[in-house]
Image (spheres, rainbow, N blue to C red):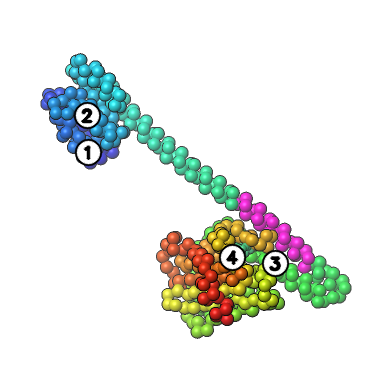
């Protein structure tokens, strides 16, 4: 039994009369008592009852009170032990204080002295509890402050990164509008068309950035609905195709035989996959070793899951970059990237109970494999962690060269 309320006192004395007197006095004061006539029985009882206060004789046949005090303190330093001493036991009493006895009272027992010693013991118990409570709330405050600091730091980082990105995009928009107005003045409609296209692309990028920020600022619940997988794939291609056209990149789609539905938040899943496809396009554009590139986009349906594979033959990534791509604000694209894309894609895929696997190698291209359960599943946070394979064979196996 645990003495939760601090109301149990263990009385230890070899003399039955003293135990009786103590029992009566302590029960009068409102305590519950348990008794032992020697140190060995007392220690057994202590382990069973866990009293917060022990009142023990200092001298007993077969094991003295100081030995018992030391054993109790070794077992639980927070137990308050009051020693009962006889005449001429002053040295023993002082020794007991050295072993952290709370107090000592002398025989014959004076009830007032006993009460004072008990009050001191109770005060120590209360003070210790208060200290523990303070320490706990202090730890809580420190934890909250650290979380707040982290949040503020990432908010500051985001504002910096976004303003920087916005500045670049506004320059792009200015450039597009300049082409439109100068084209109109000169009646050069090819120039107007170019300007419109540049402005449209920039607006598209601004929209994506704003959507990313909104998603980052407030994680919302998924709005799942049944979606035909084939329709979902077609929509995705429709969104990404304009980014690819005219860039010397071929998008090879492999959706043959894909039927059935999945239960997902189509908007968010689409945004996540569009970002992975856009990254693949960017990686191809950065790679000047070959005049043309290919992005392979395949969907397979191995049972309960649906697997999207996006493979490019672009610049690829080294191990260091691979390990950082899912971190918030990590980007190697300067003002053209915010580094929110894969962070959010990973979060959306995790919310669906899915998983991203990445394999990449510098100069070999990259392969992103996204596995999504077709129906709602229970989510285990560890299994949602992205996996980085950084393995050349993995890129080659399913990459453009084999599946194109
Ligand atoms: N297919 C890929 N090939 C090479 N590098 C890639 C590929 N996909 C992602 N990366 C790297 O991962 C980084 C992070 O990608 P992420 O999509 O999170 O941000 P971003 O594309 O830079 O910016 P944005 O927030 O606009 O998407 C990229 O900057 C790039 O360095
Ligand atoms: Mg991106």
Foreground residue, 29 or 18? 18
Mark 4 and mark 3 lie on one chain; the one further toward the N terminus is: 3
The image quadrant where one finds the C terminus is bottom right
Q: Along the horizontal axis of the image, is 275 left or right of 55?
A: right
- Magenta residue span: 155-176
Check if residue 170 falls in the magenta segment.
yes
Find residue 248 and report its image quarter: bottom right
**Residue at which label 1 appears:** 47
Residue at (64% x, 79% y) in the render = 250
Q: Along the horizontal axis of the image, is 391 left or right of 181?
A: left
**Residue at which label 4 appears:** 317
Q: Position of residue 175 (x, y in %)?
A: 78, 65
CA gap, disc 3 and disc 2: 82 Å
The dot on residue 267 is none
Q: Tally the marks.
A: 4
Q: Main secondary structure of the magenta part?
A: helix
Sort mark 1 into few (<14), some (14-19) or many (20+) by Cα contacts within 10 Å: some
Residue at (18% x, 37% y) in the render = 44
CA gap, disc 3 and disc 1: 73 Å
CA gap, disc 2 and disc 1: 15 Å
Residue sticking out furthest to the top: 88
CA gap, disc 4 and disc 2: 68 Å
CA gap, disc 1 and disc 4: 62 Å
**Residue at which label 2 appears:** 67
| Residue contact at pointers 2 and 1, CB within 8 angstroms | no
Q: Is mark 2 within 8 Å of ligand 1?
A: no
Check if residue 166 falls in the magenta segment.
yes
């Amino acid at each position: 039994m645990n003495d939760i309320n601090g109301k149990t006192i263990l009385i230890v004395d070899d003399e039955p009369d003293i135990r009786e007197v103590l029992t009566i006095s302590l029960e009068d004061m409102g305590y519950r008592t348990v008794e032992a006539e020697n140190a060995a029985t007392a220690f057994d009882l202590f382990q069973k009852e866990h009293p917060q206060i022990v009142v023990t004789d200092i001298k007993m046949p077969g094991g003295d009170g100081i030995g018992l005090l030391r054993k109790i303190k070794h077992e639980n330093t927070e137990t308050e032990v009051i020693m009962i001493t006889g005449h001429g036991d002053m040295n023993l009493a002082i020794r007991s204080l050295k072993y952290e006895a709370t107090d000592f009272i002398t025989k014959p027992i004076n009830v007032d002295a006993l009460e004072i010693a008990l009050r001191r013991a109770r005060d120590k118990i209360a003070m210790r509890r208060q200290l523990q409570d303070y320490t706990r709330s202090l730890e809580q405050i420190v934890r909250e402050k650290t979380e707040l600091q982290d949040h503020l730091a990432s908010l500051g980082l985001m504002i910096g990164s976004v303003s920087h990105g916005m500045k670049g995009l506004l320059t792009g928009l200015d450039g597009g509008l300049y082409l439109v107005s100068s084209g109109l003045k000169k009646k050069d409609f090819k120039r107007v068309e170019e300007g419109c296209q540049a402005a449209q692309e920039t607006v598209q990028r601004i929209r994506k950035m704003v959507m990313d920020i909104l998603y980052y600022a407030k994680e919302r619940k998924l709005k799942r609905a049944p979606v035909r997988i084939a329709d979902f794939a077609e929509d995705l291609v429709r969104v990404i195709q304009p980014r690819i056209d005219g860039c010397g990149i071929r998008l090879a789609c492999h959706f043959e035989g894909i039927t059935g539905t999945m239960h997902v938040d189509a908007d968010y899943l689409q945004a996540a996959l569009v970002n992975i496809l856009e990254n693949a396009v960017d990686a191809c554009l950065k790679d000047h070793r070959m005049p043309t590139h290919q992005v392979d986009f395949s969907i397979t349906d191995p049972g309960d899951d649906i697997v999207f594979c996006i493979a490019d033959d672009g610049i690829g990534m080294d191990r260091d970059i691979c390990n950082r791509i899912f971190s918030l604000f990590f980007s190697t694209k300067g003002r053209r990237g915010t580094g929110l894309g894969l962070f959010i894609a990973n979060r959306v895929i995790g919310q669906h109970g899915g998983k991203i696997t990445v394999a990449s190698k510098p100069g070999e291209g990259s392969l992103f494999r996204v596995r999504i359960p077709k129906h709602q599943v229970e989510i285990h946070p560890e299994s949602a962690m992205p996996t980085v394979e950084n393995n050349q064979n993995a890129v080659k196996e399913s990459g453009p060269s084999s599946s194109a």
